[in-house]
């Protein structure tokens, strides 16, 4: 079947597969490229299985069938074939700024004046790998949350020289494929999501290092505590609702927050003996040989949660219409 436009995906790992499924879900023709051709074959086989499973469980996104969506995702033998005539190219290669410089330089040679060159990087600003490109005004970051098919947030981060229209187009495209885009007004290391996540991870490592809690109890504190409220509300609105507004919250709890925060100390290094201990403990909960099984478990629950949130949002819209 004919697609509604061509989208290129560079890199066929977990992130690339997720993006391919998302773009195909609304009818885009997806060209999947990887420097190792056999990896694309593995990716396509996995994508087909995922789409079928999602269809069987009723969680497939979009209005097309699994077979129709899969038919839109095709293997590319060359980067040129992937980039040329695409309206959007999503780069999903290994997280190395030197590699991204090379990939974007190579894509630059095949890019038209209209294509958006978007990176899935989780921490490198677009300015770190696009400065010398002919089409640098068309380069932007579109950082997804792993796995992108099951978690809708996308951070859109322009470089100082990115054309404002590219920001608008990227946000519109992400919304079209069912994602929830947010735009950073300026580049900052780690963007927004990872800066918040790293602060959380740092404190988890401190508590484990200092013997305050077991690793299992630390994780339980999140998925049975903060994680439940944060599935629907951000931390700032949570503060707002937990008092008579934000100013009242600051008045009640601000001094305590400041005093506790001052005790955190330097960030722990995620390496060496401490990393070995964390690894040993987490493998008791999630053994390495069962990671694939555990990922399927995670994705199924994320899918169900996303479906529930969509249903609740639709009910709220219907209620507002009635009023």
Image: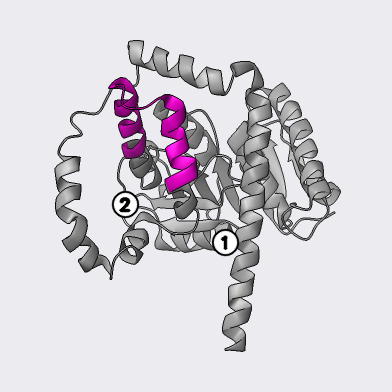
Residue at 83% from the left image edge and 53% from the top image edge: 65
Residue 9 placed where, x, y %? Answer: 62, 40
> Is any part of residue 80 visible from this angle?
no
Of the two numbered discs 2 and 1 on the same chain, state the one appearing first in sequence: 2
Residue at 47% from the left image edge and 18% from the top image edge: 281
Q: Which residues are magenta?
A: 199-225
Asked if residue 211 lies in the magenta stretch, the reply is yes
Residue 175 badge: 1
Residue ranking furthest to the top: 273
Residue closer to the observer: 321 or 36: 321
Residue 203 placed where, x, y %? Answer: 31, 33
Residue 160 badge: 2
Residue count near mark 1 (Cα–Cα under 10 Å), binned few <14, some 14–19, many ≥20 = some
Q: Is residue 321 above or below residue 49?
A: below
Residue closer to the observer: 16 or 257: 257
Residue closer to the observer: 219 or 235: 219
């Amino acid at each position: 079947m004919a697609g509604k436009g061509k989208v290129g995906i560079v890199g066929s790992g977990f992130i690339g597969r997720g993006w391919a499924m998302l773009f195909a879900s609304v009818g885009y023709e997806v060209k999947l490229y990887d420097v190792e051709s056999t990896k694309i074959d593995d990716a396509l086989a996995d994508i087909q299985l995922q789409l079928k499973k999602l269809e069987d469980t009723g969680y497939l996104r979009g209005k097309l069938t699994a077979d129709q969506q899969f038919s839109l995702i095709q293997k590319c033998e060359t980067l040129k074939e992937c980039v040329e005539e695409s309206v959007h190219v999503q780069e999903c290669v290994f997280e190395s700024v030197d590699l991204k410089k090379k990939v974007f330089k190579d894509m630059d040679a095949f890019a038209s004046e209209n294509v958006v060159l978007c990176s899935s990087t989780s921490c490198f600003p677009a300015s770190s790998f696009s400065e010398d490109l002919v089409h640098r005004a068309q380069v932007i970051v579109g950082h997804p949350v792993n796995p992108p098919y099951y978690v809708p947030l996308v951070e859109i981060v322009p470089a100082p020289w990115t054309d404002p229209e590219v920001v608008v187009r990227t946000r519109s495209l992400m919304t079209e494929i069912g994602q929830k885009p947010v735009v950073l007004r300026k580049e900052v290391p780690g963007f927004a999501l990872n800066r918040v996540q790293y602060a959380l991870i740092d404190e988890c490592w401190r508590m484990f290092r200092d013997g305050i809690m077991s690793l299992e109890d630390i994780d339980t504190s999140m998925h049975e505590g903060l994680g439940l409220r944060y599935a629907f509300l951000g931390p700032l609105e949570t503060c707002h609702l937990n008092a008579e507004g934000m100013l009242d919250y600051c008045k009640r709890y601000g001094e305590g927050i400041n005093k506790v925060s001052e005790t955190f100390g330097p960030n722990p290094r995620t390496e060496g003996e401490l990393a070995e201990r964390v690894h040993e403990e987490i493998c008791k909960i999630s053994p390495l040989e069962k990671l694939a099984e555990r990922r399927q478990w995670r994705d199924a629950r994320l899918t169900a949660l996303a479906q529930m949130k969509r249903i609740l949002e639709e009910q709220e819209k219907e209620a507002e219409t009635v009023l």
